[in-house]
Image (tube, rainbow, N blue to C red):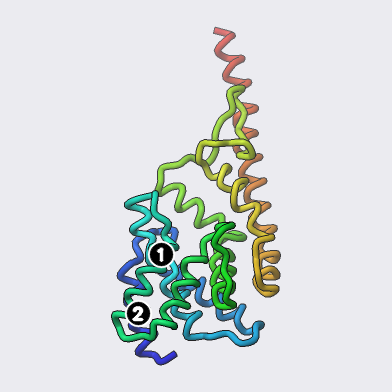
Amino acid sequence: MEKAVYSLLESFMLSCMKDSAHDKEHVYRVLYNALDIAKTEVGVDYDVLICACLLHDIGRKEQFENPALCHASVGGDKAYEFLTAHGFDTGYAEQVRHCIQTHRYRKNNRPQSLEAKILFDADKLDVTGAMGIARTLVYKGSMSEPLYSVLPEGRVSDGEKDTEPSFFQEYKYKLEKMYSLFYTKKAMEKARERQQAAIDFYNCLYREADSAYKGGRAELDRLLSAK
């Protein structure tokens, strides 16, 4: 890819990125992870891959403003319109659109091309390990969602059966299950290397929160009854 083309795509991406959990640094990490994965694959179209990585989250603003929209679907169409408006071949633009529209995990819309699978894996890698924990906490904070829910009996819920959003609910619903969803061997290996960091953080946070409630509530009840 020529530098001038990269700069054009990067500038468009930067104009679209407003989400703190899905900011430009997330995009760059996805791109760099994708390039690392691509080195272990044969026949990668780097022009398609780089473009799709740069533009994969440009539909976030529309989804934030209207949660009924899917940022992957919106972003794919935005990328196609941008590319064709700037003289790129429609076939190339369509390949990029496919990559972007299938990078979000959906059973009925899975990536088919090699480039789409690499983008999917690179994006999911950024939800694993310590980085995935940090990004989830940033996002949950921006949405004013709590770290955990408290059960009726006064104990901290581990998130397993929660329906209300929280960090623990997101960990059990999504983060914990990410490690078997990859298409490429390289991405699977990188994810496994990161997995223990996420497990350790969740377990430590749960123990610390739960121990405070167990000891603290019992002591409070004792003091209140004494009065």
Quadrant into which the N terminus falls: bottom left
Between residues 105 and 34, which one lies in front from this camera angle? 105
Q: Secondary structure at mark 2?
A: helix
| Mark 2 in CB contact with mark 1 (< 8 angstroms) | no
- Point out the residue furthest to the bottom here: 2
Q: Quadrant of the C terminus?
A: top right
State the residue in front, 162 or 75: 75
Residue 110 or residue 184, whichever sits in front: 110
Q: Which residue is mark 1?
A: 23
Sort mark 2 into few (<14), some (14-19) or many (20+) by Cα contacts within 10 Å: many
Residue displayed at 47% across by 85% down: 47
Q: Earlier in the sequence, mark 2 or mark 1?
A: 1
Say what amino acid the circle numbered 2 marks: Leu
Q: Check disc 1 and report its element: helix, strand or loop.
A: loop
For the point 65% across and 61% down, the residue is 181
Work out how far the residue at label 2 is from the one at label 1, CA to CA, in angstroms: 21 Å
Q: Nearer the viewer, residue 159 or 71?
A: 71
Type of amino acid at the residue the image marks with label 1: Asp
Q: Quadrant of residue 192?
A: bottom right
Tally of numbered tags: 2
Residue 207 quadrant? top right
Give how far across and how far down residue 69 sits, in percent.
39, 54
Residue drawn at point x = 36 percent, y = 79 percent: 9
**Tag nearer the camera, 2 or 1:** 2
Residue 111 x %, y %: 57, 69
Q: Which residue is mark 2?
A: 83
Q: Position of residue 102 (x, y in %)?
A: 51, 66
Image position of 48 with respect to 148: above or below: below
Q: Is residue 50 left or right of residue 204?
A: left
Residue 178 numbered mark, or none: none
Q: Residue at x 61, y 87 (%)?
A: 43
Q: Is residue 172 left or right of residue 56?
A: right
